[in-house]
Amino acid sequence: MRSAEGICIFELQECDFESVMMIILMLAPLTWIFMPFQRPNIKTLFFTYLIPLIPFILVLDGLISVYRTRSPSHILHLANLATLSLALEGEDKVIGDMDWKWEHGAERHTWPFGRLVWVVGRRDWSDNNGNVTETEAEAEAEEESYSEAEHGI
């Protein structure tokens, strides 16, 4: 967060029952369905169909990933801790002039279970009175000129 202008985090799942069901009901059957389209290998076929070790490991890995997924509120908490830590260390010289604006949400990507969770944070370079500082004004002007050049305006 020291040198970042913004950050975006995407999670294809949440730590909930729906994501667990998506992993169990989709990952193992898809492994069995798509394995014949892979390059033939006797070991792969053996550990997919006779002793389904490959589907088991894929499902176990998916379940661990679901368990380790952070919620948007937890991500925001970690970001606030990082900002406070930088302020206490005194390493970020502009920390007093800078704040972060956060947005988050969820979008359905696979019916009926899959949801994409997103968190976007960007620096707010306004002073305490709400006035935009020079750095933000320069960034807005650069963005406008880029947009004009891109669209031929």
Image (spheres, helix red, strand yellow):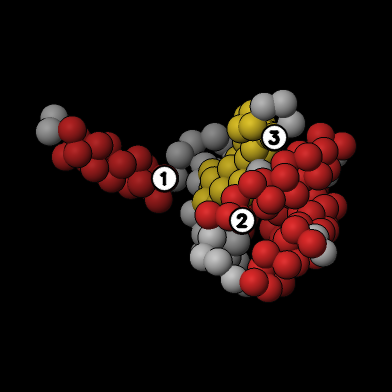
* Mark found first going from the N terminus, 2 or 3: 2
Q: Which mark is residue 114?
A: 3
- Residue 130 % position (x, y): 54, 34
Could you tell whether 39 is left or right of 95 in the image? left
Q: Label 3 sits on what residue type?
A: Gly
Residue at position x 67%, y 64% from top?
A: 45
* Mark found first going from the N terminus, 3 or 1: 3
Could you tell whether 22 is left or right of 95 in the image? right
Q: Label 2 sits on what residue type?
A: Met
Q: Mark 1 = which residue?
A: 136
- Residue 4 % position (x, y): 52, 59
Q: Is residue 108 visible?
A: yes
Q: Is residue 61 visible?
A: no
Instruction: Determine which quarter of the picture holds residue 59.
Output: bottom right
* Mark found first going from the N terminus, 2 or 1: 2
Secondary structure under the numbered disc 2 in the rendered image:
helix
- Residue 119 % position (x, y): 63, 42
Q: Quadrant of the C terminus?
A: top left
- Residue 17 % position (x, y): 87, 37
Q: Residues within 10 Å of mark 2 (few under 14, many from 20)?
A: some
Residue at position x 31%, y 41% from top?
A: 143
Residue at position x 51%, y 65% from top?
A: 39
Q: Residues within 10 Å of mark 1 (few under 14, many from 20)?
A: some
Q: Mark 2 = which residue?
A: 35
Secondary structure under the numbered disc 1 in the rendered image:
helix
Q: Label 1 sits on what residue type?
A: Glu
Q: Residues within 10 Å of mark 3 (few under 14, many from 20)?
A: many
Front position among marks 2 and 1: 2
Nearest the viewer among 61 and 73 is 61
Q: Quadrant of the N terminus?
A: bottom right
